[in-house]
Amino acid sequence: MTTLRDPRVTSALARLFARADEDDARLQGSWTADFATATPQEQADAAAEVVMPISAAGGRLLYTLIRAIRPARVVEFGTSFGISALHLGAAVRDNGFGHVVTTELSASKAASARETFAEAGLSDVITVLLGDARDTLADSEPVDFVLLDGWKDLCLPVLRLLEPRLAPGTLVVADDIDMPSMKPYLDHVRDPKNGYECVTFPVEDGMEISCRL
């Protein structure tokens, strides 16, 4: 049995996906122009109770990629309540080595995610960094796999911050690429001069997988 099938993990995922469905129904059409022009911290505070998940299929894709390429250090931008990190952590566990570093602006979401990881038996392979990813990820540690699933207008700045530490062959995955605010990011990774080969996966709102060349 894989860790992804561990009852503790499947229970956590079922609970979070169910909550996400409730949030979608309750909040549909409620995002305002004021929200769009708020700072990242203001947006995080306003959405502190909202689950912003990857899809179930997207999670399985992430798990499969991590199992296949066996990265030592996985970096995620945008923890939310931890759905994607559960998939990443399960894959790292099953690989037998590696660690997931995930970032979150909302203190309450970070605390909730840590509790979930502990309940799922994955807290030893997942570290949650609280704060702006442009600060918390400003170290010199190498990065072997990147998931960008935070505020979309920050995906490109976060990638640029990490780029000096991406070795050839590193995969960068971005979620929700159908959103208009992802255009600057997509323009960057799809431009050959910036050193990526990309493929789009039609999962929910789209996932872009870019290989650092």
Image (tube, rainbow, N blue to C red):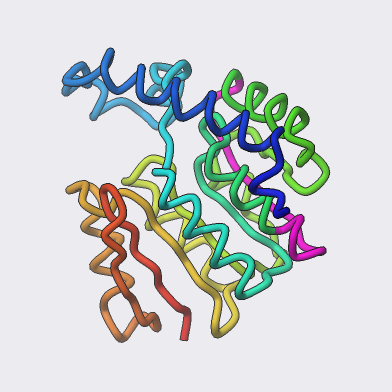
Q: Is residue 142 above or below residue 74?
A: below
**Residue 44 position by quadrant:** top left
Q: Is residue 109 left or right of residue 210?
A: right
Q: Is residue 106 magenta?
A: yes
Q: Is residue 185 left or right of residue 126?
A: left
Residue 53, image x, y percentages: 43, 36
Q: Residue furthest front?
A: 1
Residue positioned 36% across, 17% down in the render: 22
Q: Is residue 52 above or below residue 1?
A: above
Residue 65, image x, y percentages: 54, 67
Q: Is residue 126 magenta?
A: no
Residue positioned 36% across, 82% down in the render: 197
Q: How many marks?
A: 0
Residue positioned 59% across, 41% down in the render: 103
Residue 182, image x, y percentages: 26, 53
Residue 4, image x, y percentages: 64, 48
Q: Residue 44 versus residue 175: which sits nearer the camera? A: 175
Q: Is residue 36 left or right of residue 210?
A: left
Q: Residue 157 versus residue 197: which sits nearer the camera? A: 197
Q: Which residues are magenta?
A: 92-107
